[in-house]
Image: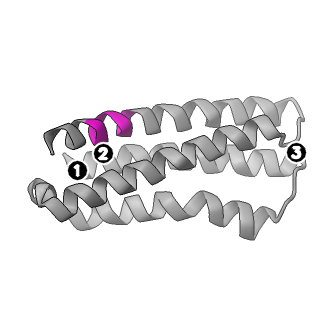
Amino acid sequence: MTTILAIHSALSNTAWLFFLIIGLWGLVRGIRGQAVNGNYLGAAFIGQMIFVIQALLGFTLWVSGLSTGIQRSGMHLLYGVFALVFLPFIYLSVLRGDDSNRAQWVLAFTTLFLFGIALRAITTAA
């Protein structure tokens, strides 16, 4: 189980760094007036899969009892659940298939917000 804990910890660093990079990339695309394309949506999907893997690893740690050392485990869980549902919610409910420059701005700010959520989830686990 310590291996799963190490992977969960390392993947959390991957998540915040990945979302920072695609968030900044999205801002550059928005400034250039570009619309959303498959490359950006693919990167966002990969980021979402990082959160899904994190959730599965976190659930495994919770079931095994290794999450008892977290002081604010409820907040950590809340940030994790929010990270799982926020990007699909924005894409399906707010954008509804829009691929304009406005959608690029929305996705850029969404991914930057998820960067902050990933950092906040890490600090609540410490």
Q: Nearer the viewer, residue 84 or 20?
A: 84
Q: Is residue 56 above or below residue 2?
A: below
**Which amino acid is tagged 2?**
Ile
Q: Quadrant of residue 36?
A: top right
- The first of marks 1 and 3 along the sequence is 3
**Percent position of residue 97, x then y:** 85, 60
Q: Which region is colored magenta?
A: 7-13
Task: Assess whether mark 2 and mark 1 are in contact (beta carbons under 8 angstroms).
Answer: yes
Left or right: residue 61 versus residue 35 is left
Mark 1 and mark 3: Cα distance apart in space: 36 Å
Decide: few, some or many residues near mark 1? Use Cα within 10 Å; few <14, some 14-19, many ≥20: some
Q: Secondary structure at mark 1?
A: helix
Decide: few, some or many residues near mark 3? Use Cα within 10 Å; few <14, some 14-19, many ≥20: some
Q: Secondary structure at mark 3?
A: helix
Residue 81 seen in render: yes
Q: Secondary structure at mark 2?
A: helix
Mark 1 and mark 2: Cα distance apart in space: 5 Å
Left or right: residue 103 versus residue 7 is right
> Label 3: which residue?
101
Q: Is residue 93 above or below residue 103?
A: below
> Label 2: which residue?
122
> Label 1: which residue?
125
Left or right: residue 126 versus residue 53 is left
Mark 3 and mark 2: Cα distance apart in space: 32 Å
Q: Residue at x 88, y 45 (%)?
A: 101
Instruction: Tell me which secondary structure the magenta stretch mostly adopts.
Output: helix
- The first of marks 3 and 2 along the sequence is 3
Q: Residue at x 45, y 39 (%)?
A: 15
